[in-house]
Amino acid sequence: MLQFDLLKTDPSSHARRGKLTLNHGVVQTPIFMPVGTYGTVKGVMPRSLHEMGAQIILGNTFHLWMRPGLDIMKGFGGLHQFEKWDKPILTDSGGFQVWSLGDMRKITEEGVTFASPVNGDKLFMSPEVSMQIQTILNSDIVMQLDECTPYETKGHLTTEAEARKSMEMSRRWAVRSKDEFARLENPNALFGIVQGGMFENLRQESLDALVEMDFPGYAIGGVSVGEPKEQMLQIMAHTPHRLPAHKPRYLMGVGTPEDLVQGVADGVDMFDCVMPTRNARNGTVFTRFGDLKLRNARHKNDPQPLDTSCTCHACAGTSGVSWDQGGREGFSRAYMHHLDRCGEMLGPMLTTIHNLHYYLNLMREVRESLDAGEFSQFRAQFKSDRARGV
């Protein structure tokens, strides 16, 4: 089941406000989706995800297939009951993880043969296998199996001919994914994935073919795979608004706060990225006023919270009142610096909570600005605040 209601559009850009209804709940868009690779968003309790406003999270088909395996997933009736998450879940197809195995895998028309990174077993992933795994996972949004077109291969930039070959196979795999999804009578929703590398004409061909197949929703893949930022922004500007207006649009694997706001302006409804959680574990914190590197010695004695305007548990404690509103219950930058230097587990847990809260709150503010007809003013203030620096 999928229903997408377009609630409002922004006259100054391609930005839009929507509501996505899925089998496990309603998602207000634009939205950022935290990544839960192994059935967990690293370091964050499901209750905390609820409290910070997460509406939908990701699961990783490839890794969950490896561990704990499909027999266990069948026993729990899918990923929701296994990880105790009662809201929507999106699963990727496994294509990106297979692509990232490099020389450990062999891609043919039929699918991908590779050695398990867990125990070395010889395994095979095809569009049909991906649909079968995701049906067992019972994710609300299922992704077609695609080949992620690299920006460069073995030291040379991917040519248009190479990108076309890859895109056309992804298109054929989309047909097979759709057929197998229907055969399995999966009650959830299947998204097609637009590929084509950095070539706008190939992106358009891929888009046109997928739209003709009439998927419930569409994703833009093959970005944030090593290309220069300018080329990623070029594809973001080209592709999303050309997809059907009455269906949700998902930009895969992107990105920074600036990328999200720009993506919304380009017509994207849904985002995911490991950046807020991965960077948190490495001591980098996103704030309203720029990025903060906790490992810098200048934070050693700083009594301020990570973000003076933030109401997350790390910044505001249990009061939910930000520093600049008089709240003084949060943890100081000095304490967070200390935890990072000592390798204490609490450090990355708190920075992860903060970064996800920041991303989710950013998208909430984007939705509110669209509701109020003030998105252009919001973008200007966002850029000004981020440029101010911490």
Image (tube, grey):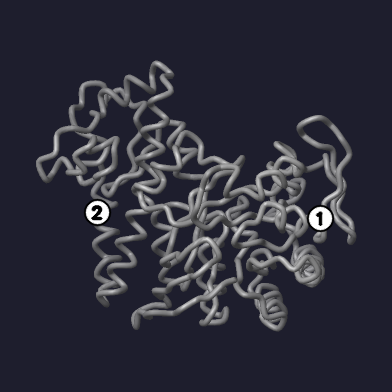
Residue at image position (74%, 43%) is 65
Q: For this rendering, which residue is in front, 233 or 287? A: 287
Say left or right for 1 vs 156.
left
Say left or right for 201 vs 329.
right
Mark 1 belongs to which amino acid?
Answer: Val
Return the residue found at the far left. 326
Q: For this rendering, which residue is in front, 8 or 266? A: 8
Of the numbered discs 1 and 2, the one sitting upstream in the chain is: 1
Mark 2 crowd level (few <14, some 14–19, many ≥20, 10 Å Cα): some
Task: Evaluate whether residue 157 shows in this view.
Answer: no
The residue that disc 2 covers is 385
Point out the frontmost of discs 1 and 2.
Answer: 1
Residue at image position (86%, 53%) is 107
Number of numbered discs visible in the structure rendering: 2
Q: CA distance from mark 1 to mark 2?
A: 47 Å
Say left or right for 8 vs 317.
right
Q: For this rendering, which residue is in front, 306 or 247? A: 247
Q: Residue 199 placed where, x, y %? A: 66, 70
Q: Residue 57 placed where, x, y %? A: 51, 52
Residue at image position (82%, 60%) is 128
Say left or right for 115 vs 348.
right
Helix, strand or loop at label 1? It is: helix
Residue at image position (48%, 49%) is 34
For residue 374, what is the image quadrant? bottom left
Q: Residue 193 placed where, x, y %? A: 66, 67
Above or below residue 354? Residue 222 is: below
